[in-house]
Each structure stands twice: as C-alpha cells, then as structure tokens.
C-alpha cells in the first residue's frame, strides 16, 4: 500500500513540474498573433478548401495581412467576402465572378464500353497510372469519384448507373478542388453568367473511327459546327471545338448541326442542371 501511495505522489509531482514547465515555455516561445490577420480570418468562410492557393483560411489571412496576397482569391466567399476584406484591410479588390464546375464528358457506362475488369486501386489516379483508363475512351471519366471525395460542400455525387459524377450547381461554390483532383482534366470552372457554346467532350483523338467506337456520344471532328457557325467563331485546331465567347451569340445552330449532340449552350446547360 505504501508503495502505491509513494508512486501516486511521485507521479503527481512529475505531472505538476511538467505542467508548470509547459506553461512557462508556451508563454516564453509564443509567437505574437497579428490582430489584422485575426480579423481577416474571421471574415473568411472557414472552408479551408485551398482554392485561394493557400493551405487554408488561416494561411490566406496571414498572407493578406502581410501584403503577400490580394483579397479577391476566395471563390467560396465570393463578392460578399471581398467587400468585408476591403473594409478590414483598406485594399481594393477585383470583382469575383461566381463560378460553378461543369463536367466536360458524357462517357457513361451506357455510352462507353469498359476495357475489361479492373482490379487495381479504386481511385481515378491509380487507374490512370496503372492502365491509362478503364474505358475504351482514354480521354473520358474514370468513374471512381475522386472529385466527389475532394468536394467539401457536398456538391458532387456519383451516379451509380452511369458511372459519372453529378454536380449540384446549387451547392457548388466554384472552389476548384474537384478540378484539381481530376487526372483527366474533365471538370472546368464556368462563370454562372457565362453565355455561348461549350462542348461536353474531351476526346482529342483524330482517329474518327476509333472515337466513334470508344464512345457513342463524342465529338467526331466532322467540322460541321465550324462550317455552320454564322459568326465563324469556332476553332477546331485542338481537335475539340472551342468557341470565341466574345463573338458567340448563343444562336444554337452549331448545337443543331452536331451529329452527336455534344455541343451545348452554356446558359441553357446551367439552367437544366439547376
């Protein structure tokens, strides 16, 4: 019994000494906090998504306070946060255009055959490194949902039947985390007020026969969109039709002429998705 008591007293003494020492060293080595950085941090949304280019809101706040970052990089907070930061810092910020993520691929399980049975690591990057892709279209979505896991706002989910991610535009903040995570570069940020034509296909192969075989809904490089555009604003030099949105009038003629219907009018597409 005496040994137990002595052990307990000894343990309490050590704990007291260590606690006192830790308290002393905490105060002795404490790094003074910048009050300005604290105010900036409180104004930020706290998503810690990294869309601003910094590891989290805390680091972004410190960078702004130190003059190493502007106040317009928070796409999650948008114009409201820029306005708050402008009042706190006295800096002028550029207008932040709210954006949403759009998947530029329609290569679902219904449209794109599988190469075979994949037994490797069940994530997109692993499948990309191991086999170059699980479907016949090597440019398309790999279907393991890395983008879904990366989203911190619950804006993405996987359609199990199609094998493609679904983006809830009402929840999407345009932070860009899903864009960074996709090894196929299939997700793009589109301003909510953007108008014009866009293509929901990323297959840049010039082998038209192989393209048709690999996906039922894919750009066949036929050039009809280029020929039929009244504004002559569509370029096919990258093997994917890209419209000059400063000239595009959203007339929809290219959409009508596209044999596989991969061309969409942006504002209509965003409205449908909502």
Image: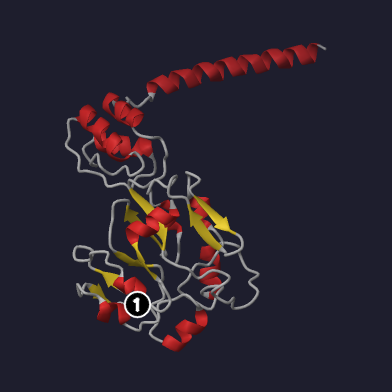
Answer with the quarter of the image where residue 184 lies.
bottom left
Is 256 placed above or below 210 here?
A: above
Counting the numbered discs, the total is: 1
- Residue denoted by label 1: 257
The one of 41 and 200 positioned closer to us in this rendering: 200
Question: What residue is drawn where x is 41% and y is 76%?
Answer: 203
Whether residue 158 appears in this view of the structure is: yes
Residue 196 point in image, percent of width and height: 28, 63
Answer with the quarter of the image where residue 183 lies.
bottom left
Is 76 placed above or below 122 here?
A: above
Decide if residue 62 is on the left or right side of residue 91: right
Is 101 placed above or below 24 here?
A: below
Question: What residue is drawn where x is 47% and y is 18%?
Answer: 23
Residue 138 point in image, percent of width and height: 48, 76
Residue 180 point in image, percent of width and height: 41, 57
Q: What colour-coding does the image apply?
A: secondary structure
Question: What residue is drawn where x is 67% and y is 15%?
Answer: 10
Whether residue 237 appears in this view of the structure is: no
The one of 219 and 64 positioned closer to us in this rendering: 219
The one of 55 and 257 positioned closer to us in this rendering: 257
Answer with the quarter of the image where residue 34 lies.
top left
Residue 17 point in image, percent of width and height: 55, 16
Decide if residue 110 is on the left or right side of residue 240: right
Decide if residue 85 is on the left or right side of residue 211: left
Q: Secondary structure at mark 1?
A: helix
Decide if residue 226 is on the left or right side of residue 76: left
Question: What residue is drawn where x is 59% and y is 78%?
Answer: 115
**The N terminus, quarter of image:** top right
């Amino acid at each position: 019994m005496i040994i137990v008591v002595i052990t307990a007293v000894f343990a309490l003494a050590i704990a007291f000494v260590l606690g006192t020492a830790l308290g002393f060293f905490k105060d002795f080595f404490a790094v003074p906090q910048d009050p300005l950085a604290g105010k900036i941090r409180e104004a930020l949304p706290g998503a810690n998504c990294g869309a601003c280019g910094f590891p989290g809101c805390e680091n972004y706040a410190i960078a702004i306070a130190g003059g190493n970052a502007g106040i317009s990089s928070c796409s999650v907070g948008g114009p409201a946060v820029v306005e708050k930061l402008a009042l706190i810092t006295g800096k002028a910020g550029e207008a932040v255009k709210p954006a949403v993520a759009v998947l530029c691929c329609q290569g679902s399980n219904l449209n794109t055959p599988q190469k075979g049975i994949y037994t490797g690591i069940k994530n997109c990057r692993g499948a990309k490194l191991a086999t170059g892709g699980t479907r016949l279209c090597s440019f398309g979505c790999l279907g393991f949902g890395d983008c879904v896991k990366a989203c911190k706002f619950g804006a993405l989910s996987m359609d199990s039947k199609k094998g493609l991610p679904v983006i809830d535009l009402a929840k999407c903040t345009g932070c860009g985390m899903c864009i960074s995570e996709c090894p196929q570069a299939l997700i793009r940020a589109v301003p909510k007020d953007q108008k014009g034509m866009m293509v929901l296909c990323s297959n840049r192969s010039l082998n038209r026969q192989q393209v048709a075989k690999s996906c039922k809904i894919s750009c066949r490089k036929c050039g009809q969109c280029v020929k039929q555009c009244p504004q002559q604003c569509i370029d096919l030099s990258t093997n994917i039709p890209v419209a000059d949105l400063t000239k595009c009038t959203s007339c929809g003629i290219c959409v009508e002429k596209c044999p596989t219907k991969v061309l969409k009018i942006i504002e209509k597409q965003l409205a449908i998705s909502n």
